[in-house]
Image: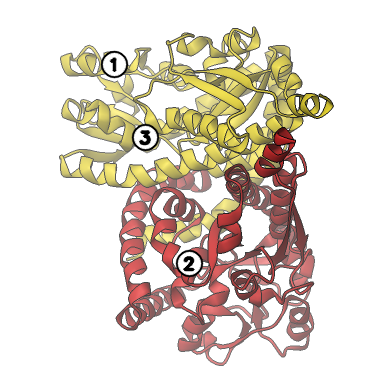
Chain colours: A red, B yellow
Amino acid sequence: GAAAAVRADESPTIRWRLASSFPKSVDAIYGAAERLARRVGEITGGKFQIRVFAGGEIVPGLQVMDAVGQGTVECGQTAGYYYVGKNMAFAFETAVPFGLNARQQIAWMYAGGGRELMRDLYTEHGVVMFPGGNTGVQMGGWFRRELKSIADLKGLKMRIPGLGGQILARLGVVPQTLAGGDIYPALESGALDATEWVGPYDDEKLGFHKVAKHYYYPGWWEPGPQISFYVNLKKWQELPPAYRAAFEAAAAEANLYMLADYDAKNPPALQRLLKAGVQLHAFPKDVMLAARKTAFEMYEDEARKNAVFKRIYSEWKKFALASDQWFKVAESSYANFMHYVK
Amino acid sequence: GAAAAVRADESPTIRWRLASSFPKSVDAIYGAAERLARRVGEITGGKFQIRVFAGGEIVPGLQVMDAVGQGTVECGQTAGYYYVGKNMAFAFETAVPFGLNARQQIAWMYAGGGRELMRDLYTEHGVVMFPGGNTGVQMGGWFRRELKSIADLKGLKMRIPGLGGQILARLGVVPQTLAGGDIYPALESGALDATEWVGPYDDEKLGFHKVAKHYYYPGWWEPGPQISFYVNLKKWQELPPAYRAAFEAAAAEANLYMLADYDAKNPPALQRLLKAGVQLHAFPKDVMLAARKTAFEMYEDEARKNAVFKRIYSEWKKFALASDQWFKVAESSYANFMHYVK
C-alpha cells in the first residue's frame, strides 16, 4: 500500500542506455563508462541500471552529443572536442593545444569555475556534462623519419584530427583523419608519414612502433584531455535526487580512476616499447614555438568572432597563467629534481 | 510485514561518527570529510548519516587510527604517516620523502597495487583504509634567513615533524614538533628559525610570511601527501553492500576534489604572497642531494629490520622508477616547455 508506493517513488527502477564514442579496445577509457555503470548499480541496489554500448553500436562515435541531446539515448561517454564544429568552445571541455595539463584541467573543472562557465553551452544542446576521465598528456606520435626542424613538416602526411591538425596545417603538415583501424596499414605503406594516437599503453596495442620507430613528445595538442559523461537534460531533471548524487559521485570516481589507470599502465608500456627499439625524441624547439604561437593566434581570432568562446577563453587563460606560475614553483621543481639530478 | 522487513534490512538507518585528525581551519582537508559525509547522505536518501568531528573534539588528532581500530568511532580522516611509530610502512600511505607525486600516489593506490600491498597492515590494526585526498607537493617552508648551502642547516631550529624531520636532523637541523597555533609566535620571537606547513593557501592563513620572508621549494618530504579515510573493519563488514559502494565512491570523489581544491586555491594565494614581498627560493642543490641520499639510506636500513616495510618498499620503488621514466618524457617535457620557454 502506501509504504510500497513511497518506496517506488524514492527508488524507482530506471534503465538508461549509455552510448560511448569509444571502442572497447581503448579499454582505459571505455572501462570508465563500465565502472560508472557498475558503481551506480551497486549504490542503488540494482535499481538504477545503465547499459553501456561501444562507439558505433547504437550511435556513431562522433554523434553522441546529438543522440544524448535529442534523447535517443539517456547518456553518453564522449569528448567535447569532437563538437568544435558546433562551437569551438567545446574544446575547453577536453583539451586545448598548449592548454591545461590533467591536474589543471581537473582543478579548473571542479574548483576553478570551469563547469559553471561552460554550463549554458550544454544547456543549449539539451545536455548536462560531467567530467569522467583524463588520459594525462598524450604523446606526439609516431614518425617514419626523424624531424630535424620545422622545415621537415612541409608536406608531411600525418593522421591528426582536431585543433592540433589545424595548427599543424598552418605549419605545412597535410593533416589526415583516419579511424583507429585504418592507421596501421596507411603508416606501413607510406600513405601516411606520421600518426598520433594516445600514449604508450594504447599505442602499443596498435603496433605503430613496428612501422614507424620515431616516437615524439609531448602531445602539446592534448596536454590533459578530459573524457566526459553527457546526460540528457530532461532525463537528468527527472532523476530522483539520490540517483543524481550517485551518478555524480560515480562520474568523479571514474575520472580519478581513468587517470590512475593510464598513469599505472603507461610506464610499463613505455619500457616495453623502448626494449623493442623505439627511439624517443622531443619535438624540435622551433616546431614547439611556432605551434604555440599559431595556437594562441587561432584562439584570439576565434574570440573576436565567437562571444561564447571569448567569455570562457578569457577566464580560462587567467586560470592557466596563475596555475602555471604555481606548478612551476612546486611541482615542476620537484619533478625536475627527481628526473634530472642523479 | 515482510516488505517492510526487507526494506529495513536493505536500507537501515545508520549513524556513524567520523573523527578527523585535522582542525576546521585546514579547510581544504577538513572539507573533504564533510564532502564525504554529505555525499553519502545524499546517495542514501539520508539513511547513512556520518557526523564529522574536528581533530581533538572527540579524539586527539594523532590517535585517530587507534580510535577507529578499537571502535571508539566508526571512521576517521587521518594520514598514515602519523603512525610511523607503529610501523614505518604507514608512510607509504601518505608521503615518503623523495617519493611519489600526487598523480603517482593516486595511480599507485588505485591501479598500481598499492592498496592491496598495504591491506594486511591495516587489517592488523582493525582498520580499512580509503584514499581520500591529496594536497599536491607541499612547500619547503618559511625561513627567517636565506639558506646558501647545506652548512646553513647546522643548528637550525625548524618545525618539521615526521620522516622529513628525521632526515634533516641527520643534516644538522634541530627538528621541532609544534602544533599549528604555536608556530607563529615561536617564529616571530626567533625560538624557531624556520617552519614548514602545507602550501601557499594554508600557509597564508597562518601569516608566516610576516615573520619569515624566505619561502623555499619544493617540500621534498611531502611530494604528494595522501589524506585517508579509515573505517573500523568490523563496522565495514557489517555495512550493507550498497552503503559500502556509496562510501567508496564518495571517498574517491573526495580524493579528486581535495587535490582540485588545492590546485585551484594555491595559485592565487601564491600571487598574493609574492605581492606581499615573499621571496621564493629553491633549496640549495647540495641540500637536496644530501637529503635524498639520507632518505634512501634510511629506507634501506628500515628494510633490513622490518619485513613488512621491505615488502612494500621493494614494489613501491619499482613503481616509482618506471613512473618517473614515463613522467619525465611526457608530463615534464610539456610542463617545462610551458614554464620555461616564453
Residue B139's disc number: 3
Name the kind of residue labelled 2 in the image: Thr
Foreground disc of the pair 1, 2:
2
Foreground disc of the pair 2, 3:
2
Q: Which residue is mark 2?
A: A123
Residue nearest the observer in this picture, A98 or A236: A236
Q: CA distance from mark 2 to mark 3?
A: 41 Å
Q: CA distance from mark 1 to mark 2?
A: 47 Å
Task: Work out whether residue B147 can be spotted.
Answer: no
* Secondary element at image label 3: loop
Residue nearest the observer in this picture, B311 or B45: B45
> Callout 3: residue from which chain?
B
* Secondary element at image label 2: helix
Q: Name which residue lies at 73% across and 28% down.
A: B117
Task: Work out whether residue B59 can be spotted.
Answer: yes
Foreground disc of the pair 1, 3:
1
Vertical relation: A304 (above or below) B257? below
> Callout 2: residue from which chain?
A
User: Which quadrant of the structure image shows residue A180?
Assistant: bottom right
Decide: few, some or many residues near mark 1? Use Cα within 10 Å; few <14, some 14-19, many ≥20.
Answer: few
Q: Locate residue A133 relative to residue A179 in the image: left or right.
A: left
Q: CA distance from mark 1 to mark 3?
A: 19 Å
Q: Which residue is mark 1?
A: B181
Name the kind of residue labelled 1 in the image: Gly
Q: Name which residue lies at 63% across and 14% down.
A: B87
